[in-house]
Amino acid sequence: MKVEDIVELLREDRPRVSSGFIHVWAVFWANFKIFLSYRTWVVMETISTVASIAMYSFMGLQVDARRMALAGYEGVNWLSFALIGVATANYLWMCISRLSHALQHEIREGTLEPIVSSLIDMKAYIIGQSLRGFLVSGYFMTGVLIVGIYILKAQLFISLETMVSFIAVIILMIVSYIGIGIIAAGLILVYKKGDPLTFLFATITEFLGGVLFPLKYLEDIPVLYFLAWLMPYTYALDACRKIMLTGATILSPQVSWNIFILIVYAFVFIPIGLRVFRWGLNRIRYEGTVSTY
Amino acid sequence: MNIEKLIHILSEDIPRRRTSTYRIILSFIVRDFKVWWTYKFWLILDIVGVVIFIVTYYLFSFITTSQHVQDAGYSVGGYFTFALIGISFQHYVHFAVQTINESIRDEQWNGTLETILSTATDFKIFLLGEVCFSFIVSSTLLLMSLLIGMLLGAEFYTTLSSIISVIILTMLLIASHMDIGILSTGVIMKVKQGSPVTWAFSWLSQLVSGVFYPLKLLPWYLEWLGKAFPLTYSLDGIRRCLQSAEDLSSPVVLSNILYLSIFILIATPIALYVFKIGYDSARRDGSLGQY
Amino acid sequence: MVDYAVETIDLTKIFESKEDGIKRIVRAVDHVNIKVKKGEFFGLLGPNGAGKTTLIKMLCTIILPTEGTAKVNGYDIIRESVKVRSSIGWFHGETGGRSLYWRLNAEDNLRFYAYLQNVPKDVAEKRIDALLEFFDLTKDRKKLVKDYSTGMKVRVMLARALLHNPPILLMDEPTIGLDTVSAVETRNLLKALNKELGKTIVFTSHNMFEVEQLCERIAIMKNGRIIVDAHPSVLRDMLRDIRAVEVEVRNVDNIDRLRSVLSSIDVVNRIVEVKNDPIAISVRLQVDDEYEAIHIIADRLYSYGFKLSSIRRSEPSLEDIFVKLAREGAV
């Protein structure tokens, strides 16, 4: 290939077509490919996820069914209870941290500058990265549930209605948190590191949301109990348990309040998140530190 | 500083003596402390993480029966004390293994490993220096988590003889896991990847060493697998001392100590040998500074 | 009215940083006014740290100016950043191969940016094939970029800048990480794109000869300011005027004495630079006739007992130009 050939090739110019959809796809596709290049990590992570589920099943052998019943989970097997908790908590954590992790990488590798100078709208970037997050964490969640249901024989209500409702609540949970994820990402753009904070956030969410124990037992500590019900995750987990452990659906009255709260959080946080993100991006453009680590 | 001044300073040459091992190790500790201090935030996070973990199991203990724990021979304190000991000590050793790996990897990453190894320091002392600081930090965290547990209502037998036995068991626990850390570091140097050894060891021992449940609850094959892990023997010994007032005079505790000692006797030379292989091979292909 | 491809209006970037509590202000780009005509091959010359990269990054909309603004392809870089981005192809050589996804192969990297630049799929594939072949990467196209040499990474980045066929190319040190052959190829390609397709090219470099050969107009930047903005013939004239000799003297115990001896020689116009190296001191001198000067300087140094280890005619450097301009009061 010679200089003339390149010139000839570039002589015929076709108009470029702007498409947000293609931008989202490109971000998703490239990052998914990068994810697949970490094969050892995927295998190791899968095995340890399965091992941790096995651990919960042994822990469950020590649980007193009467005390579960006292907390409002009459006849519910603790393993099933914990399985839903662990699956949703892991899913949430992986999804929400996705954007911050990705941005930290892009800053460190210097790839953020060419992205910013290209035609992509940052919203498309956020959606593309999040989609990649949904899919990868979805893989782990499905793994957890399959091992739980088929190998450890957790008793869940499995029907088309409950599955659809469960997925719907998971999506709502993510939507209610994505604003927070975007806020974290916006802060990471500026301060370049935020892992400690997101880690703290995840630990507290997992604890207060009642992943391993019924929240009833938190009532003795009113401050924590109050904080627990401030988090959208608590509502999402509660709804998921009502669906998978008692056979409710998304249309049942006992989950409607939870759904309402999740939607409210989404409406509050997404606009704030986008604003913080835009502020962060403009600030690093002003400081000239788009790829400074 | 102009050249003349510098030359003047260097001109008074004091003959070099061998720095004592203890000073070298001390300088490592001071250095690590200074680096660590710049990450003050991580310290708070470590503490918050431990506290939250303990409180989680405190609340979990409300829905458990202590029947299985008592059946296993740990008579006092019930499930919460049982889990507290498991969590605290498992964190403790996990920390030990992890820090050796991480500190070597960080040194490799920052390119400081080559510099340190080019000084006149023996690599065994170097390793010791690397772990000393994390040993101090993790011991503090261990004491703190036991204290928090006591505030939440964990009960221990704290007689002089049981505490001495626990200290001995803890030292053996750390020594045995140090070997694993050194071994996997050797592997890291050779294969230049996050070590699957540490990783597999960490989740397997959590699963089969009885951190969260008595081993009797496991199916027989996992129970047997558990017998291969030093953590299993240490946890059993420590729990017997703190939950059933046993001490070195108890044959079970003694047999735990014996097992751990044998493990260390066998594992230490192997670990140092593997480390040396990794280290030499990294020096041969000049990849000490690479990651 | 002339249509400018790039027009900066008092473009200024001030960086503030805090070091040990002391505020430091760096004027990276200081009231720069340049106008680049459509289809022009424009060279921006300057030593490292002159502000070239900051200027280019502002034109790419990655850095927002502190003051002033610029128009790229007629669009304002602050208010119409998306339109600016669709008009430019940016290359940044200094990153040395950062800024690519190391865990993707070359074609996937290019494909990703083709999508982001709204290039239709079939066109993108055709261009990726051609550019990879041109940059001699065809046989490694499926290899992950992390296994590439720096030169190969730089070539992928060059291909990326051309992929969407933009009317304006902002090439920041495009030949910095390349071997001689690829550097020549790249220069030829840029020249052809400019000649045949009328692309506007802004080309930065600290290599005078490269810029002088390629560009139709040259600006020289120093400490954030444009100190010369002229036709390359002006630079060429300046270069022709400059005759330089480099002298290397060993075992000097008094540099000032060497200086005073050298400046007392009639044929020496001025001392440009003194490099104090432990092995030898090398001094750069401007003279009128280098061949005559070499003999005179050598004789004189010998007679004063200096140990002259080498003396030779030297190509003019950026430093010479700065000294010359300073003397003429242009800076």
Image (cartoon, coloured by chain):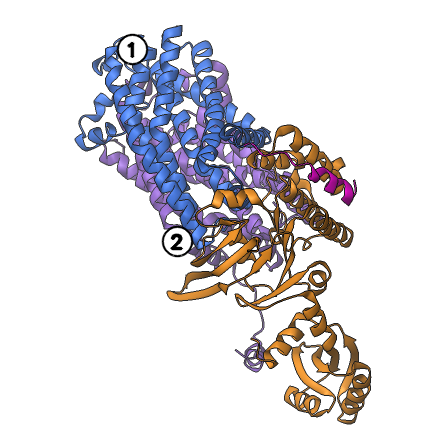
Chain colours: A blue, B purple, C orange
Front one among B110 and A131: A131
**Which portion, as a residue range, is magenta?**
A1-17
Image location of residue B285, percent across then percent down: 71, 47
From this viewpoint, which residue is outermost toward the front?
A: C1
Query: In the figure, is residue A64 to the left or right of C123?
Result: left
Which residue type carries mark 1? Leu
- Under circle 1, the secondary element is loop
Image location of residue A134, percent across then percent down: 45, 25
Front one among B183 and C111: C111
Query: In the figure, is residue A254 to the left or right of C237?
Result: left
Labels 2 and 1 within one chain: no
Residue A214 seen in render: no
Q: Residue at x 27, y 29 (%)?
A: A231
Give the position of the N terminus of chain C as an image quadrant.
bottom right
Against C124, residue A84 (above or below) is above
Please give the residue where the numbered disc 1 appears in the rendered image.
Answer: A251
Residue B187 seen in render: yes
Distance in Å between CA atoms under marks 2 and 1: 53 Å
Instruction: Give the chain letter at badge 1.
Output: A
Image location of residue C286, percent across then percent down: 71, 81
Please give the residue where the numbered disc 2 appears in the rendered image.
Answer: B37
Image location of residue A41, percent across then percent down: 55, 30
From this viewpoint, which residue is outermost toward the top?
A: A159
Are dots 2 and 1 in contact, CB under 8 Å?
Answer: no
Which residue type carries mark 2? Trp
Q: Residue at x 32, y 31 (%)?
A: A205
